[in-house]
Amino acid sequence: MIRFDNVAKRYPTGREGLAGVSLQVEPGELVFVTGHSGAGKSTLLKLIGLLERATRGQVWVNERNLNRLKARDVPYHRREVGMIFQDHRLLADRTVFDNVALPLVVAGMGHQEIQRRVRAALDKVGLLGKERSQPISLSGGEQQRVGIARALVSKPPVLLADEPTGNLDPELSREIMELFLQFNQVGVTMLIATHDVDLIRGFGKRIVQLREGRILHDSGAAA
């Protein structure tokens, strides 16, 4: 499903985001990616979503070599990779419904199918009654749920979350993580970048720890 072969990413400033990372994530697997700020967590997710391209090495997603993907094919790839951000990135001048519908509108989906999918996604995250609300009227946890619904509405096989609980209190953080576990149980492949090691240890899932752009420890690696 996802494979990194000796991947490095160097930014124009000279900073090295990743340095020789090799990693394989199986279909339907949930992997937590941990490490201090600057360890490479966000860079790893951005390479999968093609928000960045690798400087060296090969990145494969769904049997597709991202290094060889042409610019015109990037939007099609991104439709198969849902992304959730710490800062939600919701459009303040659009309703909750319109924010969630945006990926489907961009994809040219029909009106009735958009209505059905958006309501189903909002129902999954417990926000069906908030579809006409403005994002500013929601709590931080509710805004994060809107972001999750938007990432899920296209039914992508891969879901990436970059510090999705970074701005939430412990109780809300656990609720969001348990929501991700439910999606994973129906076959969605997930990578979740988080610094909250105490929270994720109890879930019994694979944890990949990064330090200075390299894998320091992988709980799913063969002994």
Image (cartoon, rainbow, N blue to C red):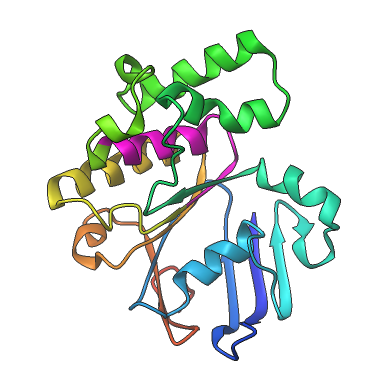
Residue 135 vs 158, above or below: the answer is above
Question: Which residue shows up at 38% across the image and 17% down it?
Answer: 132
**Which quadrant is home to the C terminus?**
bottom left
Q: Is residue 25 left or right of residue 41?
A: right
Image quarter of the N terminus: bottom right
- Residue pushed farthest bottom? 14
- Image side of residue 125 versus residue 89, left or right: left
Compare residues 198 and 84 and report the one nearer the observer. Answer: 84
Q: Tell me the quarter of the picture where residue 200 sits.
A: bottom left
Q: Can I make out residue 179 in this image? A: yes
Q: Residue furthest front?
A: 93
Identity of the residue drawn at 86% across and 58% down: 70
Q: Is residue 156 magenta?
A: yes
Q: Is residue 178 magenta?
A: no
- Is residue 98 or residue 72 the one in the foreground? 98
Q: Residue furthest top?
A: 112
Task: Please name whichever residue, 110 or 138, is drawn nearer the observer in this view of the structure.
Answer: 138
Q: In the picture, residue 137 is in which quadrant?
A: top left
The residue lying toward the viewer, choosing from 13 and 43, is 13
Specify the quadrant of the image occupied by residue 58: bottom right
Q: Return the x and y of residue 24 as percentages of the image width and height.
A: 59, 66
**Image x and y of residue 212, in percent:** 45, 87
- Give the residue at x 62% y 60%: 48
Total number of numbered discs in the rendering: 0
**The magenta stretch spans which residues?**
142-160
Q: Position of residue 101 (x, y in %)?
A: 54, 25
Q: Is residue 154 visible?
A: no
Relative to 168, is 161 on the left or the right?
right
Q: Is residue 59 above or below residue 143?
A: below
From the top left corner, tell me how far across and down residue 139 is, in percent.
22, 37
> In the rendered view, would you say 13 is above or below 206?
below
